[in-house]
Amino acid sequence: MGKRYQKLFAKYYDPFMGRIEAKLEHRRRLLINPLIGDILEVGSGTGVNFKFYNELAKVIAIEPSKPMLEKAKERLAELEPQHITLLNIGIDDDKLLKYSPKEGFDAIVCTLVLCTVPNLEHTIELFKQLLAPNGRLIILEHIHAKNQPKAFIETVINPIWKRIGEGCNLNRKTDELLKIKGFKAINENYFKHSIDFYEGVFVSC
């Protein structure tokens, strides 16, 4: 998809996600508001999480899509926080090292973004490198359905959905892959809002 579609996607993303976000807001708040220290938010999108960070969180929010970044800037300007820095880079951009604390981030936040990263396994490995010892990985993601026939349907339509959804994959087993790649869940929960969702707090084993 071209730049024009990216702009349209960013423009209508929040209205399209409105009903789901209304159901996720409380979960976002519970996951994010307690965080303190150096925080990395991966794929901040339109900045939905910004209002949940408390002032003791020093946040580096990264977003590779320029149109989404512009929406996030608008939301950031409304909140006027002094503790959130917004950057137009991806998780594998070398520029991130400039903003990374020497001992690593105290937490990494991923909400509705791991469905879109090009290489999920590589991204998880980067999390290990970027987190401080005992740092926490905060996850709120939709995942591949656990039951048939929904899982089959998601797999069938995924190529089309991925194209119109700016790289969003419906059939990623993010919950399973995190554990395979060496993360331990200290708190996790499965729930449904039309599709299967997963939230968790992880530490690296």
Image (cartoon, helix red, strand yellow):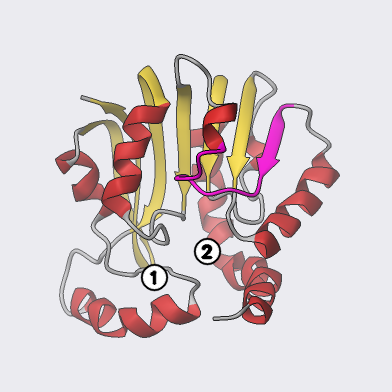
For the residue carrying disc 1, how many other residues have a C-alpha within 10 Å: few (<14), some (14-19), or many (20+)?
Answer: few
Residue 151, how many percent across, how many down? 21, 73
Q: Find residue 83 and name its label.
A: none
- Residue at disc 2, secondary structure: helix
Tell me which segment is drawn in magenta: 83-95
For the residue carrying disc 2, how many other residues have a C-alpha within 10 Å: few (<14), some (14-19), or many (20+)?
Answer: few
Say if the magenta span includes residue 57: no
Image quadrant occupied by the C terminus? top left
- Residue at disc 1, secondary structure: loop
Tell me the residue at 77%/44% (across/down): 76
Any part of residue 90 in sight: yes
Q: Which of marks 2 and 1 is nearer the N terminus?
A: 2
Residue 33, how many percent across, how many down? 58, 30
For the residue marked with disc 2, what is the amino acid?
A: Ile
Image quadrant occupied by the N terminus? bottom right
Residue 199 picture quarter: top left
- Would you name the residue on which mark 1 appears? 194
Relative depth, front residue between 196 and 57 = 57
Any part of residue 34 in sight: no
Tell me the residue at 70%/22% (across/down): 55
**Viewed as shown, does residue 85 lie left or right of 187?**
right
- Would you name the residue on which mark 2 appears? 20
For the residue marked with disc 1, what is the amino acid?
A: Ser
Question: Magenta region's main secondary structure?
Answer: loop
Whether pointer 2 and pointer 1 mark residues with C-beta atoms closer than 8 Å, the reply is yes
